[in-house]
Image (spheres, helix red, strand yellow):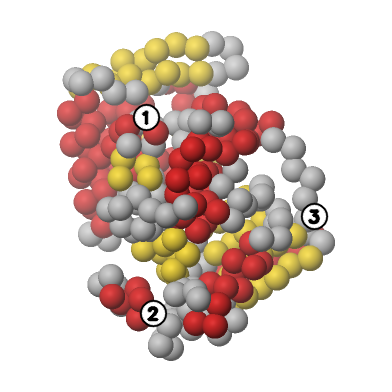
Amino acid sequence: MFTSAKAYALVITRSKTRLADLGDRGAIEGAVGRLIGAIRAKQQALAEGDALARLVFSSIPEIRKHSNLIIVPDAQLHSVPFAALVVGGKRLIETHAVLKAPSASTYVLLQKAKNTMRRSLLAVGGVRYNADATRIAQQRGYKLDNLPASRDEAIAAADVLAPIVQDRLVLGGREATEAAVKQALRTPRMLIHLGVHGIASDQADRGALVFLPDSSAGEDGLLEVPEIVQLRLRSELAVLSACDTAVGMVQGQEGVANLSRAFLLGEPEVLCPRYGQLTTRLARH
């Protein structure tokens, strides 16, 4: 958690809870900026990952004793891929299971939620973006090419999860229209895997996952935040294998207004009652 000048971490283990002083907020935010810059420049970012890890974890020796980490970030730390940080010469993902949660209460409530839905999987990949399908996205300044391996990724996900699902639906090619995906999502799915293009926006409700348009159904191909929220999804796991799904405007302790949060906001009764008003407002947009 950040104050105006300092950074702190609330460290919780099974045996104790304590407050750790992480030092100067400005130093941490500077290290965050350098790490994100290196990643966007497609560099390995080993030095940057090590520098940020030293600032964040030097006062938290507990990470050496616990291999499972649940991280609830604040402010600019929301943009950090913690699994890519370097501790002891190794990426954190090599030594720990890392989970990032929007809040501790959200994590607990989702863990307690009972899910009795049919064991069903929806996987989407191999969308034919090279057709006249992306003109709406192009109007926003994006040029979207095909994702050659995304269909294989969807099929692989379906095959790997076959032992635990009763039925599966794989949409790809010209079948992967926004209308078809919406219809599939209206059926409760225990698992969702979407290997598609994602586009971010400075406006919280304009981020979108990109499918094919369907003029007969009045769909432009962009599944935007208000539409995702309105679907009222019921799933145990949604994998967004797309760019920019975690990118958005940082809203303090509320987290980041992005596509990932839209999938959580679709279930306000499970998350937190006060999200209900926001859900309703987005759905009416």
Q: Please name the residue shown 59% across and 62% down the image.
A: 193
- Residue receiving disc 2: 134
- Residue receiving disc 1: 253
- Residue receiving disc 3: 118
Q: Quadrant of residue 87?
A: top left
Q: CA distance from mark 2 to mark 3?
A: 34 Å
In the displayed structure image, the side of residue 74 where residue 5 appears, left or right: left
For the N terminus, give its image quadrant: top left
**Element class at badge 1:** helix
List the single residue furthest toward the right: 166
Image position of 258 with respect to 272: above or below:
below
Q: CA distance from mark 1 to mark 3?
A: 35 Å
Q: CA distance from mark 1 to mark 2?
A: 35 Å
For the C terminus, give its image quadrant: bottom left
**Element class at badge 3:** loop
Residue 119's spot in the image, x, y percent? 78, 56
Residue 265 visible, this orientation: yes
Q: Say which amino acid is labelled 3.
A: Arg
Q: Mark 2 or 3 closer to N-term?
A: 3
